[in-house]
Amino acid sequence: MRKRLSTLALSGLALTFSAAPPSVPGADVFTPLTVSAFTPRTIAFPGTDGRTHIVYELLVTNTNATPATLESVEVVDAANPANILDAYEAKKLQAALRTTGNSAAESLTIEFNGTRLLMISLALDPSSKVPKKLLHRVKFQGAASPSPKPATPVDVTYTVAPIEIETKFPHIGAPLSGTGWVAVNGCCEVGVHRSASFACNGSLFLAQRFAIDWMQLGRDGKFNNGNASDVHDYVGYGAPVLAAADGIVVGVEDSLDDQKPGSLPDPSTITIDNVDGNHIVLDLGGGVYAFYAHLQRNSLAVRLGDRVKRSQVLAKLGNTGNSSAPHLHFHLMQGASVLCSNGIPYAIDNFDAAGNLSHDSAAEQELTADFSKSFRPASNRRYQYPLDLEIVNFSASH
């Protein structure tokens, strides 16, 4: 039987423990599970669902010989901790927990010296005020004291891990033109981009938090014309890729051939240099960089050091690098390195929302399937981020 322990509130930190509470207010307390925000601040941004989204990660480490089993993590307003903005528990908690090696966590139990990443994604109603700071109420079964030997786990609760929320984000133009562009692998559920942590230069980075793989549907609702193994049969192949803002070219690659669609390349052939295929990095100023990946070989219309203007053609959409079908991988980041920097959200200043692929249809159907029923009457949007599987029209007038 688990031992139920009392809870102490101390200087904004609530803790259950077996020893007598400190006699001095604000005294240090034992926290066997360390929890901290992966970055000290994050940015709230508007999505195409009309809600305000806040996306970030928590770094969780068990420092004690007694295994720690997570039960729940509540996200609360630091100014009013009674205001619970979201709660992660059971299946939802398990789905959001990742290893630092970019894989799903096998269970909610964290071994001695083990570390996990918890992917947090909030979606606030339009009427909700964005908090200036968040805290996290963590509940788990773990060590009651700093004993060097494993002991019977007890219930532990404390509120920790502050993260500041900013509300200013980059405004950009469209990276493509035309209609029927689908935001594949977009924000904000845990997926191939959202959870793509990468260790390099002595640190861990999440460059692709807000990355989108843009794939184009034809007017018939199909990604290609029937031959899924031929790059030339895809609607978006060869589409002009555009500068989303004025900038300076600070990174290029243009030497790789297209992959044959239908499957990813042999993992043994993927390196840190070729994973993104032919690509371009633009310095947009203010510490913001734009990244375009999987471009056609010999299609780059710019060179290192070139200054580009918004809507200028940069290259053509291809299928190079770690790609299974022609698409444009696009994201913004805080550094010039395409892998060793952290991704940031943004808003496209003018586009039309024209439908949405359901997660079931996208997962269960082949790329040759008919998605025409996913279209809806176009609705003009200003300064929003296209969420996962949104169908977007970028008209010439935008």
Image (cartoon, rainbow, N blue to C red):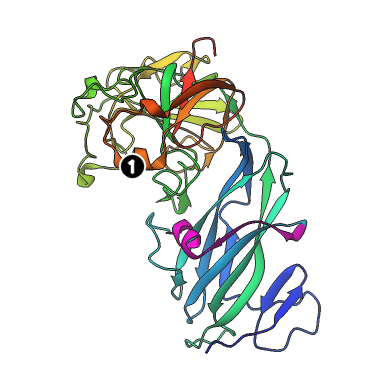
| Most distant residue in the front direction | 373
Residue 237 at what x, y percent from top left? 30, 20
User: What segment is highlighted magenta in the picture?
Assistant: 80-98
* Residue 200 position (above or below residue 208): below
Q: Which picture quadrant has residue 156?
A: bottom right
Residue 86 at what x, y percent from top left? 62, 56
Q: Find out whether residue 93 is within the magenta segment.
A: yes
Q: Which quadrant of the figure contains the C terminus?
A: top right
Q: Is residue 252 in sight in this rendering? A: no
Residue 187 at what x, y percent from top left? 49, 40
Q: Which residue is mark 1?
A: 363
Count of numbered tags: 1
Viewer-side residue, 282 vs 217: 217
Residue 73 at what x, y percent from top left? 58, 64
Viewer-side residue, 245 vs 47: 47
Q: Main secondary structure of the magenta part?
A: strand
* Amino acid at dot 1: Ala
Q: Secondary structure at mark 1?
A: helix
Question: Which residue is at 76% across, 73% downward?
Answer: 10
Q: Is residue 267 in sight in this rendering? A: yes
